[in-house]
């Protein structure tokens, strides 16, 4: 029943956006659209939800969105990994409110290590994982786009594909930011590369 209501709400919103797009088009205005890939499907993020931060990534992509990984159920990575040196500042790519903050994790612990979840003003949920330091540990904290929210780390399940693992050498731990975005319905993951 909830899915039916959500589908009706989505359909109504899509119709409203299409009507607005037609009116703007008739006025000669360009209509920006950004496509978001999610779980093998493609959908438009709409007129309001296509805001791009233009901050750029914290490092080089080491695992693409929907790429192969040994740590994900089914072997498909639902975020984008950005390899960077430990301590590299991590900005909030979208302003919003902290909804979850996990700290105290170490390298080798299972899961995503230290992470922050932020609900942006458009209803998308951003998760910044494997952080070394978390500067916004209090749920309910409001953050601005571009604000430093943590630093790149290697907490949780991380590994380096290019270096032999040495438990005494953090350079071999595979420090990176795992960035994931849930859509406004918390149903699909969106490609972070299209939003930063």
Image: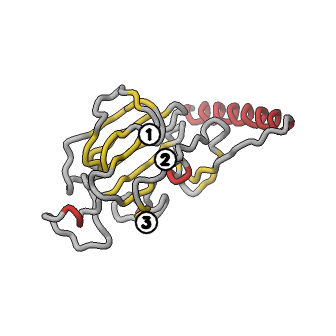
Q: Is residue 174 above or below residue 87?
A: below
Residue 21, position in %: x, y?
A: 77, 37
- The residue identified by callout 2 is 55
As helix, strand or loop, the secondary structure at mark 1 comes to loop
- The residue that appears at 19% across and 50% down in the rendered structure is 106
The mark lying in front, picked from 2 and 3, is 2
Residue 186, position in %: x, y?
A: 49, 39
Q: Is residue 111 above or below residue 20?
A: below
Q: Is residue 25 visible?
A: yes
Residue 30 disc label? none
Screen quadrant of the N terminus: top right
- The residue that appears at 64% across and 31% down in the rendered structure is 9
Horizontal side of 1 relative to 156 (left or right) equals right
Residue 35, position in %: x, y?
A: 63, 50
- The residue identified by callout 1 is 146
Foreground: 173 or 78?
173
The mark lying in front, picked from 1 and 3, is 1
Horizontal side of 30 relative to 61 (left or right) equals right
- The residue that appears at 40% across and 53% down in the rendered structure is 58
The image shows a total of numbered marks equal to: 3
Foreground: 6 or 119?
119
Disc with the residue nearer the chain's start (2 vs 1) = 2
Q: CA distance from mark 1 to mark 3?
A: 29 Å
As helix, strand or loop, the secondary structure at mark 2 comes to loop
Q: Is residue 75 above or below residue 47?
A: below
Q: CA distance from mark 2 to mark 3?
A: 26 Å
- The residue identified by callout 3 is 68
Disc with the residue nearer the chain's start (2 vs 3) = 2
Residue 146 is drawn in which quadrant?
top left
């Amino acid at each position: 029943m909830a899915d039916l209501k959500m589908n009706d709400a989505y359909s109504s919103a899509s119709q409203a956006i299409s009507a607005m797009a037609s009116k703007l088009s008739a006025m000669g205005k360009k209509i920006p659209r950004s496509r978001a890939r999610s779980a093998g499907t493609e959908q438009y993020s709409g007129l309001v939800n296509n805001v791009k931060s233009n901050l750029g990534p914290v490092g080089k992509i080491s695992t693409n969105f929907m790429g192969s990984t040994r740590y994900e159920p089914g072997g498909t990575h639902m975020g984008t990994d950005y390899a960077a040196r430990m301590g590299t500042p991590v900005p909030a790519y979208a302003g919003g409110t902290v909804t979850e903050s996990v700290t105290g994790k170490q390298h080798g612990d299972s899961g995503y290590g230290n992470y922050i979840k932020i609900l942006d003003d458009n209803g998308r949920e951003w998760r910044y994982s494997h952080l070394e330091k978390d500067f916004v540990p209090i749920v309910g904290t409001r953050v601005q786009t571009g604000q430093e929210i943590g630093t790149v780390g290697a907490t949780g399940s991380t590994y380096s594909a290019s270096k032999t693992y040495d438990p005494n050498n953090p350079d071999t731990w595979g420090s990176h930011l795992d960035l994931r975005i849930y859509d406004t319905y918390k149903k699909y993951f969106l490609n972070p590369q299209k939003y930063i």
